[in-house]
Amino acid sequence: MADLLARLADRSAKVVVVGQGYVGLPVAMRAVAVGYRVVGFDLSPERIKSLEAGQSYVGDVSDEELRAALARGYRPTTDAGELVDFDVAVISVPTPLADGLPDLTFIEAAGATLAAHLRAGACVILESTTYPGTTEELLAPILEAGSGLQRGDYALGYSPERIDPGNPQFGFVNTPKVTSGINAASLAAVDGFFATLVDRTVPVGSTAEAELTKLLENTFRHVNIALVNEVAMFARELGVDVWRAIDAAATKPFGYMRFTPGPGVGGHCLPIDPSYLAWRVKQHLGHTFRFVELANDVNEHMPDYVHRRVTELLNRERKSVNGSRVLLLGLAYKRATSDWRESPSVVVAERLAASGALIELCDPYIADVNARQVPHPLVPFEPAVIAAADLVITLVDHPEFDPATIAANARLVFDAKGVLRGHTFVGEAL
Ligand SMILES: NC(=O)c1ccc[n+]([C@@H]2O[C@H](COP(=O)([O-])OP(=O)(O)OC[C@H]3O[C@@H](n4cnc5c(N)ncnc54)[C@H](O)[C@@H]3O)[C@@H](O)[C@H]2O)c1
């Protein structure tokens, strides 16, 4: 492994990033920026064409950054032949659920592709979120079967991604990166590589520890969001303002972390990752991971809860959902991002449309909904558009959604995200 460490030090190493999505593209950009030769490999011809044209589809990577990387030699490609002679390969392919079960076919395919080019002394790093055991039990045998190499001939590790799309404070470089390897030499290679990309690495004792770290972080978030969502529903029944209670609790300088209620959870992580851990626990130990099941149950029902509250609110105004013009503010799964995979806003729109509401969607981060066949018009965030709706529902707290404009123009609001706190408006909060 000494050769590899030397090539990392002088940046002569060839780095390939398999999967150029929300996770893989920022890694590739950073690797180019610090001086490596970088190939961005992806199976999607559309994505590669867009990258070649200098057009980024990832919010955290600007077109300027992408074009600068292309000028420095970054090679986006669908051609697996370009992986030849790689020194470091990072795998950042999807890990979805299929019928509620982990679907590792993307990791298997990426491993098989890399194995054909894996040489002694090279390093493979898995970044995709997955259950503890994947790197050693699933990926290593695929790499070894395809390359003819054995443990010790090459380096293999796991390093979870902690990207927080749209976060202005913490990006790829200043977020500590957990690193691991299947043996000491692998850890040295994986940690050595990421130490050239980020401010601080956090080496841990095994790949399973690193895999569990990621799932622990996301399960923690999932469970705590479910907790405040359930508290919010009970607080309303008890006639208590949950938002003020949350603000007050957050003044405690130790032992409390602020989470806020909302219409549910979305994105590629929270609705999926905890189920990877629950599956592993069930498969290996036979136990049900009760916290995950409960959190899934609470968070998955939040769109239905929004639907019920909205129905009651319109009813009080002597209106029905059926025939009402309803403006949904925010389609993304979270603030300041264009990612609307698994977004609860889509479920809210479906539920209300099924009850006869005439839905309009407003999201300044999303230009096109046709690709995913969401049959509602996209409208701009403008006073006249807000005023024309019978009901406005805030589903995402995008910074562009000026609360004063909403409060001054909306005839009726259901504030599912606490956007209008501190403003006088007609309507209710979650
Ligand atoms: N998006 C996030 O915020 C985030 C954060 C942390 C971790 N993760 C995890 O990172 C992983 C990747 O997520 P993402 O959001 O980047 O997904 P994504 O869908 O945006 O990107 C994945 C890319 O991999 C490509 N791909 C699939 N199979 C391939 C193969 N065999 N060879 C080459 N390319 C292939 C796809 O075409 C796609 O472009 C997942 O495991 C996810 O859970 C995501």
Image (cartoon, rainbow, N blue to C red):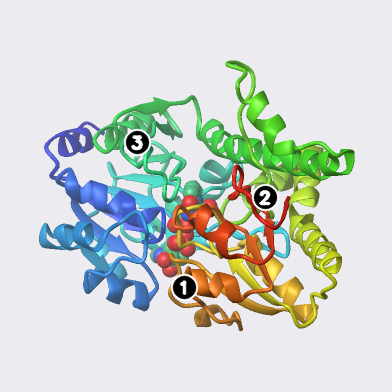
Kind of residue indicated by mark 1: Pro
* Label 1 residue SS: loop
Q: Which residue does the numbered mark 3 point to in the structure image? A: 190
* Label 3 residue SS: helix
Q: Which residue does the numbered mark 2 point to in the structure image? A: 262
Assess mark 1: CB under 8 A from ligand 1? no
Residue at x 37%, y 34% (from the top left corner): 186
Assess mark 3: CB under 8 A from ligand 1? no
Residue contact at pointers 3 and 2, CB within 8 angstroms: no
Q: Position of residue 289 (x, y in %)?
A: 78, 40
Q: Quadrant of residue 47?
A: bottom left
Q: Position of residue 302 (x, y in %)?
A: 75, 55
* Label 2 residue SS: loop
Depth-wise, is mark 3 or mark 2 nearer the camera? 2
Instruction: Please indicate, yes or no, whether residue 74 appears anywhere in the rendered image.
Output: no
Kind of residue indicated by mark 2: Gly
**On the rendered structure, is 282 left or right of 14?**
right
Residue contact at pointers 2 and 1, CB within 8 angstroms: no
How far apart are labels 2 and 1 at the CA level? 23 Å
Q: Position of residue 329 (x, y in %)?
A: 57, 64
Of residues 124 and 354, the one drawn nearer to the viewer in this rendering: 354
Kind of residue indicated by mark 3: Val
**On the rendered structure, is 35 left or right of 350?**
left
Of residues 90 and 304, the one drawn nearer to the viewer in this rendering: 304
Q: Which numbered disc, 1 or 3, marks the residue that appears first in the sequence? A: 3
Mark 1, Cα crowd under 10 Å, few <14 / some 14-19 / many 20+, is some
Residue at x 64%, y 69% (from the top left corner): 346
Of residues 423 and 165, the one drawn nearer to the viewer in this rendering: 423
Q: Which residue does the numbered mark 1 point to in the structure image? A: 380
Residue at x 79%, y 46% (from the top left corner): 293
Mark 3, Cα crowd under 10 Å, few <14 / some 14-19 / many 20+, is many
Dividing the image into 4 quarters, which one contains the N terminus? top left
